[in-house]
Image: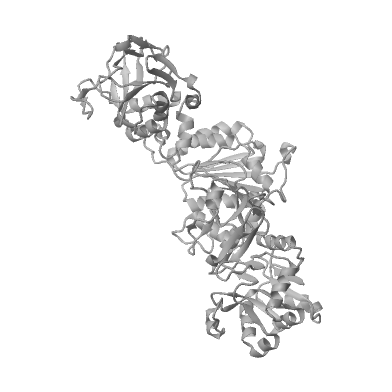
Amino acid sequence: MVVVTVATESSDGFIKCVTSAEHFGLNMTVLRMDRKLQGARQQLKCLAEGLVQYKDDNSLVILFAESMNTVFLAGEDIILSKFRHFNSSLVFSAEAVCLPDYFAENHPGVSDGHRYLHSGVYIGYAPVVYEAVSNWQTVGYGDTQVYFQRLYFNETFKAKHNMTLDHRSYMFQNLKDVEDEVQLVYDEKQSWIKNKVYNTVPVLVHGQGIGNRKLLTLGNYVPNEWTWDSGCIHCDDNMISLEGKTEFQFPEVLMVVFNLSPTAFFRLFLERLTDLDYPKSRITVRLYAMAKPNVADALVWFNEIKSIGYRDITIVTTNMNERDARNDGLHYCTVTDCSYYFAIDSIVMLENRNTLRLLIEQNKTLLSPMVTEGKNKLWSNFWGALTYSAYYQRSEDYIDIVRRRRVGVWSVPHLSCVYLIKGSLIKEVGMTFTGPTWQPMMDSDMAFTRMLRNKFVYMYVTNRHYFGHLLKYSSHTNRRHNDMYEIVNNPIDWKEQYIHPNYARNLNNSTSYQMVCPDVYLFPLISEKFAKELIEEAEAVSEWLDGKEYFEDPSASVPQQLHAGTLDLKTIEYEHQWQQFVKSYVLPIQYLLFSSFKHTGNSTHGFILRQNGQSLSFPTQVVSFSINISLSQSGVNQQGGGCHFDRYNCSVAHIPVGYALMYPGVLTHVCRTVPSKGGISDNLVSFIDN
């Protein structure tokens, strides 16, 4: 048997086809590879010229497969056995929809299976195949599909060679419009494809048009690509190593940063980019700073990194839309002849310092590091499958990939936010975010990946390493410290910035707690940054109460008076965030310290208490427990301060900034402040109840 094909270029799809054939010991003969090989006439002529040497060999079988979108699933013995089962000299694959549709009625009806001929895959004895393609002179410049359909309608030729179609995918599985028929089957050691409608196991699978999307998923597993026992079998193939390279042997990278919408923790994002472990002299930075709330941070960062050795730095603040900015980045790569183009959106928090190295070493033409919204979250920067209309569809393996239960390098139909592209590919395919399929209402990333799919460019995402996580765009842009309000939307980075660095010890080590008075515990809770920004937000609104205000408390019989110098968290619009803070960081401590009590975490009241020398009694709420967090450092802002518990005649002074006291409610722990001296003392007090 001889396997033949013609091709226009050596694409990822072509390589996949060839390597799958080689896996089964099939030597694929490429009769011609030429970009100019277009149209039925040229392709058939090429086939005729290539097969003339076999035209008299009656025992030889020829298998033709389009190389851009075919994956082999079996070796020669199985293929020949299945071919002989048809008792035919020429067998074409079949599909469910007729193209062109005006030939639909010419096809004989079938009681079972797919009715229409598809010319992408066929098998036959050498003289018959040669005869089938040898009339290429009669063809114009149309499609080979039309040529072979007319041959199929030729009753003389059809009867002479018992020409037939593989209606039930016994040998050839076409995917177009029948993706749901196909089932990926695997055990611990191998993977294969089954047509669950006809209960057949094909020897190859062919994608065309929309069917190519399904082929991407299947190709991640067959043949012998990924198993439960071995994981990703070929992930290390064709990799390169940067280990031991000198600084100037590292490839040059154009790092293009897109800050197109207001982004939380933008300064932290920039710091993590700066921290990437890659020679700065080999990186050119181009930052598109279009989000006004982030421009100031962008300019500060730009001035800071000028002196740390980057090859070149440019910041673009000119007002342009997203599509134009992304196209400008690609164009800059083309005109500067960049080796690698690393695009990253400002919502991608890279926590892995080796990200650039790892992507380059994987040696793919277009590769994205997988990033998700966080642990056990499903939002990521790739799609595992697409609907018929090219929108998101969850693939069977998506959750396992996102949660890294399946680890490898995955071919996907759509990715976004962060990716590395070889500069040569950008030039070769003419990459753009406004290609022929672009529509005014289409998202730029969808237009981009549709363009890539149409050009048969494989997109890969790797989850072989943990790279980082995704942010949600900032929903707070009018505060002095917008990031402080992101506890709900962006809890990962919020925790890093605003929770005390020793907080985790509270959950892992009971010795972290100090019982400073009976049932009064002292422990680290918030960062100095959080304490500082809370005070600054309070001072920005400057609506401290004068001591004449009351608030209604359902747990108290009378309205509760608020002291002068009190500022309600509602005043700085922080009530919702404080509720989340209590549930996420206070209740876990309470469960450990007072395990017999379980609470929903409703914060009955939260306020900042500013003390200037006097001793203040807290409102006598009937609550389960209270927390009192020091926002000012004793010995810096003031002397003294702290809490005194009358029942036990016990005082707690010199509380470090960010540390909290936790104690039961007023039934046993009526609390008042210890007078401060020489300055202002700020505390955040909250009463917690169901």
x, y percentage for residue 512? 48, 20
Counting from the top left corner in percent of width and height, residue 201 is at 63, 67
x and y percent of residue 290 in the render? 47, 44
Is 389 displayed left or right of 457 in the figure? left
The image position of residue 543, as x and y in percent, is 28, 26
Is residue 634 something that shows in the picture?
A: yes
What quarter of the picture does the N terminus occupy?
Answer: bottom right
Q: Is residue 53 left or right of residue 402?
A: right
- Quarter-of-image position of residue 184: bottom right
Residue ranking furthest to the left? 558
Viewer-proximal residue, 543 or 574? 574
Q: How is the image coloured?
A: one colour
Of residues 429 and 498, the one drawn nearer to the viewer in this rendering = 498
Can residue 31 be seen from the camera position used here? Answer: no
Q: Identify the residue at image location x=37%, y=17%.
A: 519
Above or below, 61 relative to 601: below
Q: Is residue 373 above or below residue 203?
A: above
Figure label count:
0
